[in-house]
Each structure stands twice: as structure tokens, then as C-alpha cells.
Amino acid sequence: MDLVCEVKNLRLKYPGEESLLFKDVSSSFCKGEKVLLLGPSGCGKSTFLQVLSGLIPKSIEVPMKAEKILTPSSWGYVFQDPDTQFCMPYVDEEMAFVLENLQVKREQMHEKMRVYLKMVGLHFDDLHISIQSLSGGMKQRLAIATVLALHPDVLFLDEPTAMLDPEGTKAVWDTMKQAAQDKTVIIVEHKIDHVLDFVDRILLFNQKGQIVADGPKEQIFSRYRKEIREDGIWYPGVWEDYLRDKQGYYKKTPLKEQVVIELEQFKGYRKKEVKIDVPYGKVHAGEWIAIVGKNGAGKSTLLHSLMQFIQTTGTYLLLEKEAKKIKKLSNMLSFVFQNPEFQFVTNSVYDEIAYSLRIERMKEEEIRTKVEEMLELFHLQKHRHQHPYQLSMGQKRRLSVAASIVKKQPIMLLDEPTFGQDSSNTFQLLELLEHYRKQGSTILMVTHDEQIAKHMATRIWRIEGGKLVEDEIHSCEDEQMYVQI
Amino acid sequence: MKGLKLTDILVTIVISIVFGIVYKLWGPLYYAVKPIGLHVDQLIYGMWFIAATVAFLIIRKPGVALIAETAAASAEFITGSEFGIEVLLYGIVQGLFAEIIFAIFRYKKFNIGVVMLAAAASAAGSLIMDLYKGYIDDLVFWNLLLFIGARLIGSIIIAGAFAYYLVKSLEATGVTNLVRPASHEDYDALN
Amino acid sequence: MDFDIKETWLHKINPSLKLLFLIVLFISVLFIHNINFLINYTVAAFLLFAFFTGHPMKRILLLLIPFVLIFVSTATSMIFFGKGETTWWKWGLIHITEESFYRGLHLGFRALIFALLGLMFSLTTRPVFLFYSLMQQLKLKPKYAYSFMAGIRLIPIMIEEFQTIRQAMIVRGVEQRKGLANFFHKLKAYSIPLLSQSIRRAHRIAVAMEAKRFSNDTKRTFYYEIGFSKYDLCFVLYFIIAILLSYYAAKMLPFFPVTDVRYIE
């Protein structure tokens, strides 16, 4: 078979890191193969992909050497973050950027744009449309279209759906199956539901950056199920496996008497327009509410309204007090942002958790006991001196939650806390949240994950077009109750 | 300008655009402070030099200070600065003066002293421009001295010391490793 | 920045020419010392800004508000503290003389005309066209031009991010701390996430651009070809005529009896 891509005895080390990321790693890829690279976060899969394409060391300087390296002559690369693959503001201009690079004549550009956009199923009447107005899934398909313009033999996909909702994820893989049938495709991905029927071979990495298995997907899956599960990969059936192990941990309990939030004709405004409307809602202590709905439906806006980031009208009682009259809402509500980095304000994990306690002028000894307790519960003891930015994705997320709730506020608001996380980190976080819920905390959480809504939440609020349209309580055992709105 | 890769330029320009927006917001603040008199406004003037020093400290390559200050001024101009076209010319001169200081130290010194010196040089550059533009020599002597002193001190504090500590905290996050070249030790470790 | 803008002839001027010509105008204004001439000239620039940028009147008026501040603030510091012999008024450190008054006023108009011309440019020039034109007419290297365009694309994303950081700071309690040390703490708390996110983004975009075969060395075609037109001539002629008329009117119908603010009799 024709070899399109090969590395032999690759060694690579990131500057400032103590040890090599790869030590004598070898692999090769044949024409037309569809290969999935699997492994735990931080094992170097993405780096490996960048080496195979030649981006390392050509565009990214990372110390590396290999006995032999063969990069494909024509290739395309789709990256993870939909917002950082484009340099131009409009769809036509971004497509033009690639065509200009290939020195396509100006007169032919429009026709070619249409061709490539059609391949990924994007149809616009006017191509001069702002990229920022597209959904994440559409942006990624646009990225694929620009890459197809390069006529690549080999496609490198670096977690192209990590930052997409389920709908966008499906659309991207459907597109890929259509457009890349005849190409060699090498994929790094954590969420592999839609990927599995597309690939035929799997390469499994371990924590140390070694390739532990390489073979047909069926074989890898049956032999390495345990490893794949421990690596935090979202394989089909991961939820069933997890819930079987944790039977009884997420136990639905009867509604408690105490009402913590009461809403009536509650509306939140952005630029004087109603963006979220809750006709009626009563939240009891110890509830876990999953706020679900499509992108842009107003889920985050609901949290922002509760947090009083934006203007609101109507009744909003917090523990029977009018929320507008409460001076420091952050004493009752904690808020966890989607991007953990935005809420970090200090230079170490320890200081980060201690921060809000220090503002309250608590005694240092008292602070120490509290922080130590949090460090242990959130598995961050070993990282206490590290800079928050230097943590892994999962650790950053846990730290952001720990630092937000250290004051033991009775109500937690979380904006897609499991977004982009691997399965082990997701489960770890969910267990922590359930731990707090059992102690009486109330949780309101925006999520796209139907499994979380189904198995963890005690109640689901569905938002559609800026309005709370469905309120579904699952209290004790499988009994479901719908509240009329 | 040998050695500036696309990454270096893009990072420089994006940082500069962040500061360009700060520059733009600084305009109304400056004009609001100005009528207080006694050149209190000059104490905050130094913010307009910060792009050059911060960008240089992050990327540490020749040409970065000049490009950064020019780019920040361009961003300020494009977003509709109150100062109009003059910000572009000022930007180039201020960037050039900071660049000269870094060049004198052969782009090998990144300590706080050099950064303060570069900030002061930018201030000097802006004063030369003012000489042509604003009749500043028509101010009475004590006032002129106060004017120059306030601008220099403000620059050294904001574009010098503050810029230096800002980049220090940025380094702690590890993000600057993305743009700094790898060392020989890193390469040697491969063997 | 998407606004409801009507495209006017000012939008159709070649952006490089517009920019260079504005620089020439900027420098020429520095040589005007007759306040009457400058006032007339300012009026000519104001007409373009007010009626030909294609923006709705409401926005134009809104943009005018800071101009008043610029004018007053620039003028007063020279009027109050400038050198001069013919005293009009004195109170403590404030010393208003005939000379400082006219010079201050002159400086005020100067600041005003720079602001008007500059804003006229940014209201009528799309950055993408400006950078395409700079590449085509002034041979700006593509790596600079595209870096700029990529950076400008990020502005709305950064603004959104800034708002999120602000909310996060309120929740964390950073906002409630006061004092000068905390001012710098606050400044740092905002800049670190913004800058680190920007550096990462810029780095990723640069890699993505190279992955899309962007190269500074090879020749490239252009999606937009920016050329010259009759509007360019109109623009240049407008200012030449405006300058001549302003000068003539200043001679014939002066507002103030001063011809050179540097030397006042």
C-alpha cells in the first residue's frame, strides 16, 4: 500500500518541561486510511498530529527529531477552536484568503467558493455573511470548506467537535463522511460516537506518550475497553458503564420544604429587549435543575438574570428576600463561568481558593483549614503552589468550582461546567456537585448533555426562544411530574 | 526585519490591538482630566507608550516595539480616535524611540531599568512631536517644566514599571512560552 | 463594526490615497498660524464629516459630544497657563493674556480639525479595504496586512470577553476592593486573562493561516482589487478649493483681528 505519512523514532520535548513528551515513537499511515488517535488528555495526541502534518517544526517551534519523517505533500488541517481558524471577518473573504494563497484568479473565486461550501452543506444566498453570526457547527464546516479548497490528500482533524453542541457535532461528522470518503483522514477526538463508524483503525496512546495499541477498531475496542474508559474518552456506552458502577449514588430524594428561589413574571433584558421570560418558577433546597435548550435560546441569560448581571423585572425572591434589595448576592449565589480562566485572579491554586475568604477578612488559620479541606475534596493537594493557568483542563475546572463555592453559598449557578471536558473529569465534577447537593446545596446548571439532565438532575427546565416552556420534576424513583407553566 | 515570523507579527499586532482599544478609551479620560490643570493629565499620558514595552518584553525580538506601538496607534485611529491622524505619526515616533533603546542594549536586556528607559524615550519622542504641534514652548517656564516632568514620571511608572510587572505575571501563566524560542538545553535533551 | 451606513462617495475613495492625503493635510495644518484661516478650514472639514459620511444624523450628533470636550479642554489649558504680555485677567496661577487666549483658541480648533478628519476617515473606510489597498498601492507586506485583519476580526470577541471578565470580577469580589494598590491589582486582574487569551488566539490563528498555505514569499492574487476613480480627484479638489476659499475668506472677512497667533502686536 502507498505510504502517505510516516515517523520513525520521534523524540519531542516542550521547552521548560522536565521530560520528553515522545521518546522513540513510530507510526505510519497508508493512502485512504481513516485513523483515530485515542489517549488520555495531555498524552500528546494533538502534538503528534502537528508533527505528522509538518506544522511542528515548520510553524510551531518545538524541539524534536526523528530518524525518518515523511509528511504528506498535500494536506489540510481542521483545528479545535472555531474562533481561531479564521483571519477574515466574512465567509467570502475567508474563502478568498485560501484561494489567494493558491493564486486562483479573481474571476474564478466566486464559483469555487460555491463549490466548496456546497461540499460541506453550507448554503448562503449572499456569501458576504459575517462569520461571527454563524453557529459553532457552521463555523467548523466553513473551516472544512476552506481546507477542501487546498485539494488535500490527507486530512488532519484535531478535535474538530470538542467545542460544539451535540447538533453541531453530528453535522460536522455527517459532512466529513460525505466530503472525505476518498481521502486519508487522521483524527484526534474525545467524543467518538459519530467517529466510530467512519474510522477503520485506532491508535491508542498512554499517559506517557507511548503507543500501546494499533489495529482495527473492533479489536482495539474489545481488548482495551478498560484503558479507553480510564482515559476519559466518550465512547458509546460510557454512561451505562459509569452509572452501573455508581449505582445508588445519584439518588432522587423527595422535595424539601424550604423554597430558595421564587420567580414570577421574571424577565431579563439585554438592550431593552426581553431575552428571557420565566412566568413562574419555585426552586426548593437540594434540587438540581438542569437548564436545557438550543444554542442562543437564553439559558445563560437566565443565569445572568438570576445573578443580576443584566436588568430584570418581576418577582425574584431569594430565601424569601427580594433579590434586588440584597447587597451582596455573591454571598448567597456562587457562579461558575464557562471559561474557568476568566475568574482566576491570583497566582497560585491555594491563594485562589483563599481569595474570597480573605476579602471577608477571615483569620488566616481558619482560612487554612477551609482551603485544605477544599484542596483534598477537589483533588488539588499536589498542585497547591501551581499557577492556576498552568493546570490541566480538568483541574482548572475543579479549581474554578472550588474557589467559587468556598464560602458555602446555598445556591450554585453553573454555566456548562462540563463543556469540553473528558469523561473522567466530567464524572468527577458531577460527583462533587452531587456531594454538595446531598448536603443541601441547590444547583442550577446550564447543560447540553442530555445524559446529565436525565441521570443527575432532579428537575429539568427547558428554555425555548427566550422563555421557560417546560418544567419537569423527577422526584422519587422514576416518577415524573410535569408542572404546568 | 529578519527573524520575525508570522506568529511573532500576529501576536504583536493582536496585543497591540488590545492596547489600541485601551488607548482609544484613554482619550476621553485624558480630556476629562485635562481641565483640572497643573498637568495632572500628563501623569496618565504614559499609558500611550505601553504597547511597545509590553510587546517587546513578551516577544523579545528586534522590531517588535516599533511595530507594536505603530499597530496600537493604527487600531486607535481606526476605531475613531479623538486625536485623529496625529496618533499615527505619534505612534511611529514613540515606537521608534523605544525601539532605539532596546537596540542600544542589543535586544538582550529585559530588566526593569531598560524598560523604564524605553518608556522615557517614548515620552521624549512624544515631546518632540508636541514641540511642532502644540506651541508648548509658549507655556510659562515653571509650567513647561511641570509639563515635561509629569509626562516623564507618568511614562516611567505606567509604560515602564507597570508594563514590566504585567509581563512578569503573564510569564507566570506560562502563555509566553508559546512565543519564546526554545533553548539549546531543550534541544540537547533530545539526545 | 456593522452599522446602518449608506455608502457615499467618501467610501469610494482609494483608502491609501485617503490616508496619505490626510497626513499631508495634517502636516499642512501645522503651518497655519492665522486663526481666521483655521476656523474656515475647520468648517470645511466639518461639512464633510456631518453630511457626507453616510451615517445617520443621530450618530453624527452623538459623536460630536466628545468634540466639545476636546475643544474646551485643549483651549483652556493654554488660555489659562500660557505665556503672554497683555493681561486680561489674573487669579492665582491662572493668567489669561490676549496672546494666550488666541493661541489657546487656535490650538482648540487645531485639535478639532484633526479629530474631524480622523473620524471622517474611520467612518468611511472599511479596514479590510484599507489593508488590501495598502498591499496593492503601497506594497505593505501581506504578513502585516493579514495579521491586522485577523486582529481586527478579534475585536468584538475581545469586547465580549471583557464583559464576561467584568462579571467574573464582580462575583469574585475584585470590584469591591478600593485604594491605589487595588487599582493596580484590578488592572492586572483584567489584563492577564485578556492578554493571555489574545496571545493564545493569535498564535493559533497564525498556525491556522500557515496551515492554509499562507506564505509571505509566494505571489498572491487578490479578491478585492482596489483602484482609483474620479472620486479620488473629487476628494483632493474639495480640499484644495476649501483651503483656497478659507484663506480668501480669512483675508476678506476675519473673525478676529489677528493674523498670526505666534506674534501678536
Image (cartoon, rainbow, N blue to C red):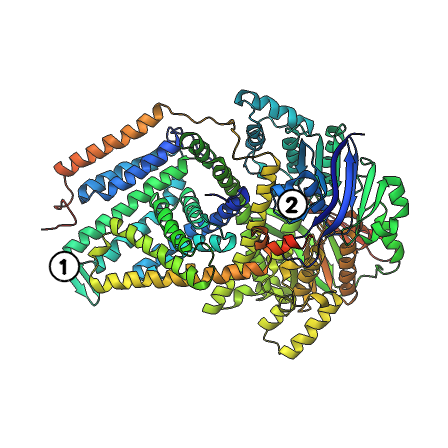
Residue at mark 2: chain: A
Neighbours of disc 1 within 10 Å: few (<14), some (14-19), many (20+)? few
**Left or right position of A175 against C258:** right
Element type at mark 2? loop
Residue B40 visible in the displayed image: no
Residue A16 on image: x %, y %: 63, 57
**Left or right position of A349 against C36:** right
Circle 1 is placed at which residue position? Answer: C88
Query: Residues at badges 1 and 2 in contact (C-beta under 8 Å)?
Result: no
Would you identify the image quadrant in which residue A66 lies? top right
**Left or right position of A387 against A293:** left
Element type at mark 1? strand
Residue at mark 1: chain: C
Q: Is residue A355 above or below residue C30?
A: below
Identify which residue is drawn at 36% across, 64% down.
B153
Neighbours of disc 2 within 10 Å: few (<14), some (14-19), many (20+)? many
Tell me the mark number nearer the camera, choosing from 1 and 2.
1
Circle 2 is placed at which residue position? Answer: A466
Identify which residue is drawn at 52% across, 35% down.
C216
Identify which residue is drawn at 22% across, 34% down.
C243
Give, as a three-letter code, the residue at label 2.
Answer: Gly
Residue B43 visible in the displayed image: yes
> Which sits in the foreground, A463 or C51?
C51
Residue A119 on image: x %, y %: 69, 27
Q: Are marks 1 and 2 on the same chain?
A: no
